[in-house]
Image (tube, grey):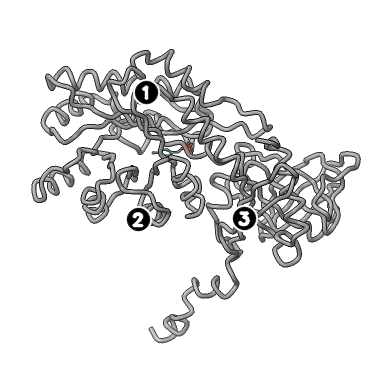
């Protein structure tokens, strides 16, 4: 690429302010670096390149916006979905069911029937769900292309963030493999069901180091070997190793990279890449996080108890995790002037606040930034995954617009719409106005 990630972002922010995509009529908006997304997807494919077949699916929960999913489909990815909303988004984006994986822990019978009939890969979460699939198979026959798998919890332990650690002893996901009798029950389940062909584990998301994830994959690989041995033939065709590569939110340099993770996998599971098993991955955050930015106008500035505070329009509605759990999910903040260029000035300790009505609605606390003034712009970096796509409608704040951007060699920025801003009329329409009299008539 002609410009690096930081330069493209800087040019895009300035162009967004100049063109009014961020300004009085749109006090908060999301921006997405299209070339950055494509670069990262290329890095992912290159890192896993080898003799074996690999399907890289994107975890739709990290950003279910249809044009983004369409971009990822075009870049060669499949899609991991959990539930009917993400399934419909993925189909609307043009993903074919054969390149989709359904992973929800609470699949209804209707969802299972739909996925099995469509040919979507399904990772069964527990033995009760397995019985439901047995009933569908008994009625409709085994799926013509066996893409049904079982999710196991290798119970290798948690990372530094409890809420995103899925391989703890008591995690709600998958069959807890180390519980008494569980592993034999899994092996028997495979031996008895020739259509059960895939094993799945997702050790965790942010906070899990590659070495921990690789240990979980080793458990998966050993289990596959045991199943094949007891079945007397290769029964497991696919190992779905999940996603979860952590993102460093402290700078533009990528740590760890997909290559680092593949090196950890090669170290922990030497046989993984020999082509015996087809591999599936499900990365979300690491694909998109660094390519998204939330920009917001500073509406007011004030001082309280000696603390400078800038009140912006980006708060808990677009940055729920950061606002509600600031110690775990800190974000980099850029201060820009009213033209959208980086602001100069001596560092002043400031809070950057959102628009919502609770005291904790801060996206940065005690941060040193050039002193912000009304009309300036604040950018929250690395918000391409789980931020503007995971809106939280506190205070009925409307969902902001999201724009994709590309920068040409001359530094000119072009934008394309990804999601239109939600209108206030739409906010009301989603609040039950058709039932306005219902409680009075009860
Ligand atoms: C959330 C999730 C992912 C994606 O995790 P990231 O940390 O975004 O890479 C993949 N697989 C499953 C089953 C998930 O729940």
Q: Ligand 1 lies in which image quarter?
A: top left
Q: Nearer the viewer, residue 366 or 35?
A: 35
Q: Are marks 2 and 1 in contact (CB under 8 Å)?
A: no
Q: Nearer the viewer, residue 416 or 377?
A: 416
Decide if residue 399 is on the left or right side of residue 20: left
Q: Label 1 CB, ligand 1: below 8 Å?
A: no
Q: Is residue 285 above or below residue 226?
A: below
Residue at image coords 72%, 55% = 16
Q: Residues within 10 Å of mark 3 (few under 14, many from 20)?
A: many
Q: Which residue is mark 3?
A: 403
Which quarter of the image is occupied by the N terminus?
Answer: top right
Which quarter of the image is occupied by the C terminus?
Answer: bottom left
Specify the quadrant of the image occupied by residue 56.
Answer: top left
Q: Which mark is residue 217?
A: 1
Q: Secondary structure at mark 3?
A: strand
The image shows residue 36 at horizontal and vertical percentages of: 60, 39
The image shows residue 423 at horizontal and vertical percentages of: 59, 70
Q: Which residue is mark 2?
A: 84
Q: CA distance from mark 2 to mark 3?
A: 25 Å
Q: CA distance from mark 3 to mark 1?
A: 37 Å
Q: Are marks 2 and 3 in contact (CB under 8 Å)?
A: no
Which is more foreground, mark 3 or mark 1?
3
The image shows residue 429 at horizontal and vertical percentages of: 50, 75
* Tally of numbered tags: 3
Q: Is residue 47 above or below residue 419?
A: above
Residue at image coords 48%, 44% = 72
N-terminal-most mark, 2 or 1: 2
């Amino acid at each position: 690429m002609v410009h690096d990630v930081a330069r493209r972002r800087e040019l895009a922010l300035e162009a967004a302010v100049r063109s009014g995509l961020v300004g009085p009529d749109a006090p908060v908006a999301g921006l997405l670096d299209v070339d950055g997304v494509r670069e990262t997807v290329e890095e992912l494919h290159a890192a896993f390149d080898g003799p074996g077949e690999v399907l890289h699916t994107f975890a739709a929960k990290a950003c279910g916006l249809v044009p983004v999913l369409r971009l990822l489909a075009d870049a060669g990815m499949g899609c991991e979905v959990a539930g009917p909303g993400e399934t419909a988004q993925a189909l609307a984006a043009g993903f074919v069911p054969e390149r989709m994986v359904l992973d929800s822990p609470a699949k209804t019978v209707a969802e299972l029937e739909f996925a099995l009939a469509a040919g979507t890969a399904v990772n069964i979460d527990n033995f009760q769900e397995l019985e439901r699939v047995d009933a569908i198979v008994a009625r409709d026959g085994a799926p013509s292309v066996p893409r049904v798998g079982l999710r196991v919890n290798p119970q290798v332990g948690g990372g530094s963030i409890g809420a995103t650690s899925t391989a703890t002893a008591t995690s709600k996901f998958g069959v807890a493999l180390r519980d008494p009798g569980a592993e034999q029950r899994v092996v028997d389940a495979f031996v008895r069901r020739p259509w059960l062909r895939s094993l799945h584990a997702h050790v965790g998301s942010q906070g899990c180091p590659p070495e921990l994830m690789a240990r979980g994959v080793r458990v998966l690989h050993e289990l596959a070997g045991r199943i094949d041995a007891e079945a007397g033939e290769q029964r497991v065709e696919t190992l779905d190793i999940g996603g979860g590569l952590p993102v460093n939110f402290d700078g533009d340099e990528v740590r760890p990279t997909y290559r680092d993770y593949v090196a950890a996998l090669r170290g922990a599971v030497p046989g993984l890449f020999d082509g015996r098993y087809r591999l599936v991955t499900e990365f979300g955050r690491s694909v998109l996080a660094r390519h998204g930015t939330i920009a917001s106008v500073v509406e007011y500035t004030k001082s309280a108890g000696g603390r400078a505070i800038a009140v912006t329009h980006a708060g808990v509605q677009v940055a729920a995790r950061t606002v509600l759990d600031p110690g775990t999910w800190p974000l980099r903040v850029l201060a820009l002037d009213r033209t959208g260029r980086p602001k100069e000035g001596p560092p002043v300790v400031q809070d950057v606040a959102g628009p919502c009505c609770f005291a904790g609605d801060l996206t940065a606390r005690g941060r040193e930034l050039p002193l912000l003034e009304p009309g300036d712009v604040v950018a929250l970096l690395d918000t391409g995954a789980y931020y503007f796509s995971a809106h939280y409608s506190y205070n009925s704040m409307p969902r902001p617009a999201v724009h994709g951007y590309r920068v040409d060699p001359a530094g000119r920025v072009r934008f394309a719409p990804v999601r239109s801003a939600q209108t206030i009329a739409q906010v009301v329409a989603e609040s039950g106005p058709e039932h306005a009299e219902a409680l009075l008539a009860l």
